[in-house]
């Protein structure tokens, strides 16, 4: 059943996950820790919204008839896809599209994996039942997941595998009656430690040995599982100083498996090279995740447009030709993304499992486009903001004897200094703070290496009919 924000936070607090930050294990409630307070509250807003607007954010579970989260719904019609798009976007609006891993992201992936469970059945009936159970449990309890599919960045040579006894990339070190034992590390779990469970998918590169080929989902508090967090980008608790980071800093972590027992009933892929290799495309996992991601990117781009125009008006620069040109670049990006998403729905088709799958080509085009255009979009904000993005007194300065100076010298065309600085601090936190640069890095990499994503689009794109056009023309002439 769909849970409330309070239920979600209380559940995460009670898991007592093994989360480390600044060299210390977090003792006590994660929701009281400054690094996680903001993001947990922002996620709680999502859960509360879902139960307050059930028509938009839930559907009836086919098994229990409970109201369950929209992200678990298997789309069977184009209307289902449209409903999913609207719900994703309404959720994203609460965080301006800045929560890249809102719960609907991985939930959607689990739905796709379970929707293609026959893929796993072909090899082993147990795996089919396991992914179905993982999905059902997640749906009925409104669980949230982090996920990991990256091995540590030690040596990216294609043929590289750990050869020494010192295990680095997480692998199966033993099989027991109860399950598989995993040792080693995985990168990079955004929100690792603040989700109910961890979804572990085949990592790239070293499929050459069976011990690296596995997929499973386990609770975040499974013994031996550790989350080592990077530095937090919430540098103080002032929402004025860090308007975005204080609310939406998601955190990223290394996931360490210290001889973690993964019970057999949690494993849904093991030792099958061909399945591991194709899991993301054959199950429509990638396409469905992209559908969520592009829906969110549109909201983020709408926010960027609104923020840029607010800066333009605040310092009255709209008459300049290059400013109009830059603003039109943002509008163009927004309209391209919207069109790609709608095109994916328009050309959606039922697959052999009776799921309505959006057309992957426009979505793949979007995931090639956004990592390139996003740095330009934040670059435009920097160019429009000029020095206003640097001279940003903080909360303490505004509440000091300097206030009258600041009020005078930092006012906008039609705004008080405080209003102007509030706006420019948002822009700074999006483009220039540690939080903001991480956002840019996220948009470049969150779906994988942009270089290989581009190669994938080229290789998989149906090009024959265009060659035919040329051939027909050349034979005529
Ligand atoms: C902010 C952020 C959040 C993330 N969140 C998650 C998450 O929640 N879950 C998760 O699993 N992952 C997450 N990722 C990881 C993301 O999936 C990876 O960053 C991405 O897949 C690229 O892998 P890598 O970072 O290991 O880069 P690498 O693969 O090490 O690439 C480094 C450089 O080497 C080049 N290179 C390496 N190998 C090849 C090759 N074979 N061919 C051509 N060029 C190559 C790349 O093009 C790149 O320039 C996140 C990443 C970031 C930055």
Image: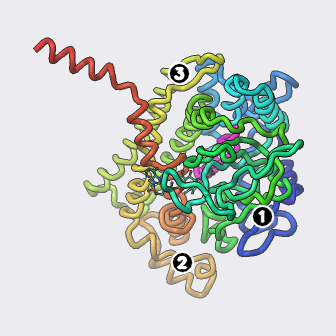
Q: How far apart are marks 2 and 1 (CA)?
A: 34 Å
Vertically, is 199 above or below 118?
below
Q: In which image quadrant can residue 133 be found?
A: top right
The mark nearer the N terminus, 3 or 2, is 3
Vertically, is 62 above or below 435?
above
Q: What element carries label 3?
A: loop
Q: Distance between the residues labelled 3 and 2?
A: 50 Å
The mark nearer the N terminus, 2 or 1, is 1
Residue 25, horizontal then vertical, whole percent: 80, 70
Disc marking residue 393: 2
- Residue, x 34% and y 46% (percent of image)? 328
Q: In which image quadrant can residue 20 be found?
A: bottom right
Q: In which image quadrant can residue 225 be found?
A: bottom right
Q: Nearer the viewer, residue 96 or 254?
A: 254
**Considering the image in quadrants, where does the N terminus appear?**
top right
Extent of the magenta region: 93-108
Q: How far apart are marks 3 and 1 (CA)?
A: 41 Å
- Mark 2 neighbour density, 10 Å: few (under 14) some (14–19) many (20 or more): some
Residue furthest to the left: 477
Instruction: Look at mark 3 in the image and give the residue it sits on.
Output: 348
Task: Name the dominant secondary structure of the magenta segment.
Answer: loop
């Amino acid at each position: 059943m769909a849970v409330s924000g309070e239920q979600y936070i209380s559940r995460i607090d009670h898991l007592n996950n093994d989360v480390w930050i600044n060299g210390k294990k977090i003792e006590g409630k994660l929701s009281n820790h400054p690094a996680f307070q903001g993001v947990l509250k922002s996620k709680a807003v999502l859960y509360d919204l879902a139960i307050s607007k059930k028509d938009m954010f839930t559907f009836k579970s086919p098994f229990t008839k409970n109201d369950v989260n929209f992200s678990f719904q298997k789309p069977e019609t184009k209307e289902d896809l449209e409903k999913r798009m609207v719900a994703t976007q309404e959720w994203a609006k609460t965080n301006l599209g800045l929560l890249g891993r809102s719960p609907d992201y991985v939930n959607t992936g689990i739905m796709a994996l379970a929707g293609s469970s026959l893929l796993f059945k072909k090899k082993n009936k147990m795996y089919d039942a396991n992914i179905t159970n993982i999905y059902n449990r997640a749906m009925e309890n409104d669980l949230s997941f982090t996920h990991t599919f990256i091995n540590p960045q030690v040596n990216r040579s294609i043929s590289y595998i750990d050869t020494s006894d010192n295990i680095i990339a997480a692998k199966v070190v033993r099989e027991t009656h109860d399950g598989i034992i995993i040792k080693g590390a995985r990168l990079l779990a955004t929100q690792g430690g603040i989700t109910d469970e961890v979804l572990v998918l085949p990592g790239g590169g070293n499929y050459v040995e069976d011990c690296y080929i596995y997929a499973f989902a386990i609770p975040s508090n499974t013994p031996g599982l550790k989350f080592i967090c990077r530095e937090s980008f919430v540098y103080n608790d002032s929402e004025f100083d860090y308007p975005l980071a204080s609310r939406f800093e998601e955190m990223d972590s290394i996931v360490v498996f210290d001889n973690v027992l993964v019970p057999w009933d949690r494993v849904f892929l093991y030792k099958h090279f061909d399945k591991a290799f194709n899991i993301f495309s054959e199950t429509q996992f990638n396409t469905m995740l992209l559908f969520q991601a592009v829906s969110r990117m549109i909201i983020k781009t709408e926010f960027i447009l609104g923020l840029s125009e607010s800066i333009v008006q605040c310092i009255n620069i709209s008459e300049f030709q290059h400013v109009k040109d830059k603003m039109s670049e943002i509008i163009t990006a927004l309209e391209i993304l919207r069109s790609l998403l709608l095109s994916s729905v328009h050309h959606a088709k039922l697959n052999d499992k009776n799921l309505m799958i959006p057309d992957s080509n426009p979505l793949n085009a979007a995931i090639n486009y956004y990592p390139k255009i996003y740095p330009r979009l934040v670059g435009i904000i920097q160019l429009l903001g000029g020095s206003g993005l640097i001279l940003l007194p903080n909360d303490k300065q505004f509440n000091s004897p300097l206030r009258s100076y600041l009020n005078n010298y930092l006012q906008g065309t039609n705004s008080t200094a405080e209003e102007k600085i509030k706006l420019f601090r948002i822009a700074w936190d999006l483009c220039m703070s540690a939080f903001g640069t991480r956002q840019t890095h996220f948009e470049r990499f969150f779906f994988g290496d942009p270089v290989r994503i581009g190669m994938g689009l080229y290789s998989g794109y149906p090009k024959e009919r265009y060659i035919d056009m040329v051939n027909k023309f050349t034979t005529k002439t």
